[in-house]
Amino acid sequence: MIGTRRSTESRGGAAGLEVDTWTDAIGRLLERFPRFWIKVGNWETRLLAEQLDHTSVSRPIYIAGLARSGSTILLELLASHPDTASHRYRDFPLVPAPMAWNWFVDRAGRTEQVAAERAHRDRIKVTPESPEAFEEIVWMAFFPDLHDPSTNAVLDEAARHPCFEAFYRDHIRKLLLLRNASRYLAKGNYNVTRLRYLRKLFPDARFIVPIRDPTWHIASLMKQHRLFSEAESRDGRVLSHMRRSGHFEFGLNRVPINVDGTIAGEIVRLWKSGEDVAGWATYWASVYGYVAAMLDDPAIAGSMLVVRYEDLCSDPGGAVSTMLDHCELDDRGLRQAAQATISFPAYYEPSFTQAERSEIRSRTAAVAGRFGYG
């Protein structure tokens, strides 16, 4: 992963949560001067104008939902399809200028990269060429209040930002050109509040929303929050890296997605008072309640596919086939790859007390039932 040392990589161990000095310095410049890097991205677009004129954005694919729902597994599967292009670890930190930065990375000297389990300790192995969720950096440059829990983060059909929309479309076209692909693929947890806006920008977009049984989902979120909080407490550069890369899902920078303008304050209050289980359960119900409401709207429901983590693990081939049909992609061996690699996690179990389980059920039952969770 560009900008993150994996001290155990040569021994096949998990990726370490350590940010090197070089990446920290460049990331600091990106964070301090976002408008400058937007100008650099626009300059890059002008240089590539002739090539980009022949590159169009058709049927982009978006994976959006809460972290730890299986979104990375889906991203890696779809990113292995030759028609798709996504952000990669190597694209950080200068995400706004992907062509220029990749030109530099290619000429700066590359050493052999051995795949290592990422810092999440969840069996997923990565290299700098692995797909990753980085488009949030672009969103934050144009919408600076998106991760303020007191601000409603929903962007719908009424949203309008011509400068962002032009930059974003050009950014996608540059990634398609860079990766020699025809379909843009993005994993972005926060895009769950922007599906209507994205559909206005790209009427043929396809949306995949992963979901997971709330008890297991909350257990996984709490495990990651603990891991990242410990690492960020030891090294402030890790904390800065997560913030700069647009990851606020867990750790000391943890911020809930505000889907209605009010409930996020209650979630923050519960977390601050030490009621983590109640806070996460309220959060789960808030986000997926918002998703359920969109599924009731025929104007957007047809472009959405909900993928249950349990269905993906119990029948990987069937789940992937449904997903490929929804995205209008041919198989290219993805069904077989899914069957060979996807299974239920065996490296942890939820350790909630009976009272905590009851708390989760009481706060999530109504929404969970909409998605077949009893």
Image (cartoon, grey):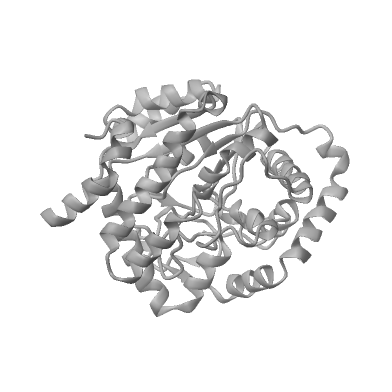
Q: Name the residue located 33 percent from the left edge and 37 percent from the top edge.
A: 309
- In the picture, measured across the screen, residue 366 lies left or right of residue 84, that is left
Q: Identify the residue at horizontal 78%, vertical 45% (top origin).
A: 166
Taking 262 as reference, is 243 above or below it? below
Q: Nearer the viewer, residue 200 or 227?
A: 200
User: Residue most toward the left?
Assistant: 354
Q: Is residue 329 above or below residue 167?
A: above
State the image coordinates of residue 330 (x, y, percent, origin top left): 53, 20
Q: Which residue is drawn at the image coordinates 30% and 48% (left, top)?
A: 217
Which part of the image, by quadrant, shows the C terminus? top left
Relative image position of residue 114 (x, y in whole percent): 45, 55
Relative depth, front residue between 28 and 301 = 301
Q: Is residue 71 left or right of residue 194?
A: left
Name the foreground residue: 210 vs 279.
Answer: 279
Residue 352 seen from this side: no
Residue 79: x %, y % from top left: 53, 38
Q: Is residue 290 above or below residue 349?
A: above
- The quarter of the picture where residue 144 lies is bottom right
Is 223 placed above or below 241 here?
Answer: above
Tell me how many marks there are: 0
Q: Position of residue 56 (x, y in %)?
A: 75, 32
Q: Is residue 128 visible?
A: yes
Question: In the drawing, does residue 362 fall left or right of residue 371?
Answer: left
Residue visible at 70% across and 52% down?
98
